[in-house]
Image: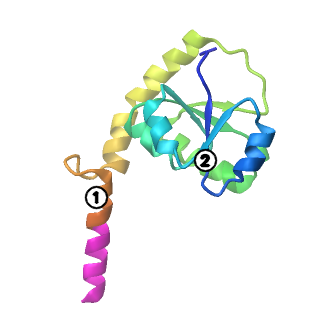
């Protein structure tokens, strides 16, 4: 319904040859998830921590769910939904999709991102997330040496 180009960003441990064979009609990339999330208008994910970047960039996000993924992956998939209640679809069900209805849902969901970012992702807005990690690692190892 969005008539957008679809790019599948495979997990670094994925067998890219296998994926390209099974998903011939799609562009599949490895090690370029950050690049494509930044360029995207809409991010579709299932149980990936890469969604944090999409949240921070306030992207439209759809979460794909399925009990067929198994208990562990289903649990991981629900972690972000618990706090953000993404637009979500169970891939084992059929839906009649309405673009206007989905767009309305996106607006209300994106409004919730700011609180989640403030409370769960960014501890200091003036320091990049990479620098925050470096600061915490240095603190940890400095405390460890003493």
Mark nearest the camera among 1 and 2 is 1
Q: In this view, does 77 lie above or below 130?
A: above
Task: Give whichever of 93, 22 is nearer the camera.
Answer: 22
Helix, strand or loop for disc 2: loop
Q: In the picture shown, does residue 12 fall above or below 56? A: below
Q: Quadrant location of the N terminus? A: top right
Q: Residue at 79% across / 45% down in the picture? A: 68
Give the camera-side residue of 122 and 119: 122
Q: Which residue lies furthest to the bottom in this view?
A: 146
Left or right? Give the position of 76 relative to 136: right
Q: Which mark is residue 47?
A: 2
Secondary structure mostly seen in the magenta stretch: helix
Magenta-highlighted residues: 136-146
Residue annotated with mark 1: 132
Of labels 1 and 2, earlier in sequence is 2
Q: Nearer the viewer, residue 143 or 71?
A: 143
Q: Identify the secondary structure beneath mark 1.
A: helix
- Whether 140 is among the magenta residues is yes
| Residue at (59, 16) in percent of width and height | 2
Q: In this view, does 83 lie to the left or right of 95?
A: left
Mark number for residue 56? none
22 versus 129 height, above or below: above
Q: How far apart are marks 1 and 2 (CA)?
A: 24 Å
Q: What is the crowding at mark 2: few (fewer than 14 residues within 10 Å), some, or many (at least 20)?
A: many
Residue 100, image x and y in percent? 55, 10
Residue 111 at x, y percent in the picture: 38, 27
């Amino acid at each position: 319904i969005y008539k957008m180009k679809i790019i599948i960003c495979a997990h670094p441990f994925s067998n890219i040859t296998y994926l390209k064979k099974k998903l011939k009609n799609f562009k599949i990339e490895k090690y370029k998830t950050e690049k494509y999330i930044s360029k995207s208008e809409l991010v579709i994910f299932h149980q990936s921590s890469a969604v944090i970047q999409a949240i921070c960039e306030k992207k439209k996000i759809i979460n794909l769910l399925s009990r067929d993924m198994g208990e562990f992956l289903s649990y991981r998939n629900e972690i972000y939904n618990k706090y953000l209640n993404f637009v979500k679809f169970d891939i084992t069900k059929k839906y009649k999709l309405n673009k206007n209805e989905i767009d309305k849902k996106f607006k209300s969901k994106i409004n919730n991102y700011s609180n989640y970012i403030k409370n769960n992702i960014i501890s200091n807005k003036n320091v990049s997330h990479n620098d925050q990690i470096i600061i915490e690692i240095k603190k940890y190892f400095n405390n460890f040496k003493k």
